[in-house]
Image (cartoon, grey):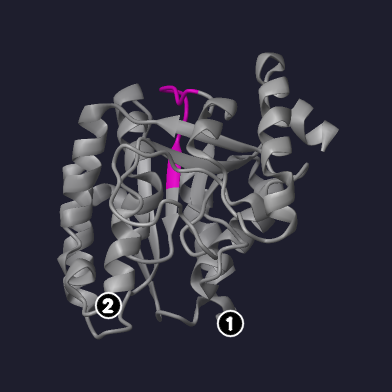
Amino acid sequence: MKNFIKHSFNRKTRLAWIAALLGFGLAVWFGRIDSLPQSAYQLLDPIAPITAQDRVMVVAPHQDDDVLGAGGLIQQARSAGAPVKVVWATDGNKHRLKAERESEARSAMSELGLSKDSLVFLGFRDATLQNDPNFPAILMAEIEQFKPTIVVTTLAGDHHPDHAACGEVVGELQQQFGYRAYYFLIHFTNYPQPFGSDRHSYLLPPLKLINANNTWRVLPLTKEQLIAKEKALKAYRTQLSLKNPFLKTLLWSFIRQNELFLVKE
């Protein structure tokens, strides 16, 4: 824990972090709390600023993960003058909505300022990515061509198998290509908290994923960036209109004051 605090937070916030942990110790021990209090946001450092020298690739398992996890980051990268490419791994065709979801993805990215030339649809079958032997080689080819300095994707510990597969492959290729990897989380037990639409709250890591090996960083969003992210999310009409109240509530849970990334240098 000492090494984790030293590695993850600056000196001025370590004592505050320790105090927060002590206040939650017993509750966590008995399994009654699995998320940080909103005040813990102040303990998390921001990610390093993206510059014009960066090249940012977002690898999204499905058409909507791009906005949920990195809609603000895409905007900030563009504002910095960094080239951005978004790669969708699967066809999102679980409900036979492939064409609709691709069209929605283009509309969503247009809201964030990206043209169709910056978008790639790999087209792997939805919900089968983890068992597809061709995925690593196809993604590697995209990385070789674009030469990103930053790759943004879902965490290998995400509970959705397609999300886990993206995180695993990006992690495996990192040593070969030398990019920085930013991982975001979508599907995890009791995450995010508070659950549902709450644009004034912060996105914070689950307690179960806080340890000495995980360096969490935040990306604060401006009011304008948050509005644009919300507009982009609304482009995914098929997802928001599905007769699945949990999914709709989950999607709106990522319209928050910040985005959250586990950073691997």
Residue at x 53% of width, y 42% of height: 261
Quadrant of the rendered image containing residue 222: top left
Residue at x 21% of width, y 76% of height: 242
State the residue position of label 2. Answer: 244
Residue 134 image position (x, y, % from top left):
55, 76
Could you tell whether 265 is left or right of 154 in the image?
right
Residue at x 24% of width, y 85% of height: 96
How many angstroms separate mark 2 from mark 1 (CA)?
A: 26 Å
Residue 198 image position (x, y, % from top left):
30, 46
Indicate the secondary structure of the residue bearing disc 1.
Answer: helix
118 is within the stretch colored magenta: no
Could you tell whether 204 is left or right of 61 in the image?
right
Query: Among all residues in the image, which is located at the extreme right?
Result: 2
Q: Is residue 113 visible?
A: no
Instruction: Tell which circle, 2 or 1, labels the residue nearer the N-terminal end.
Output: 1
Disc 2 and disc 1 in contact, CB within 8 angstroms? no
Give, as a single range, the part of the protein colored magenta: 49-57
Given residues 132 and 140, the one toward you in this image is 132
Residue at x 73% of width, y 30% of height: 18
State the residue position of label 1. Answer: 131
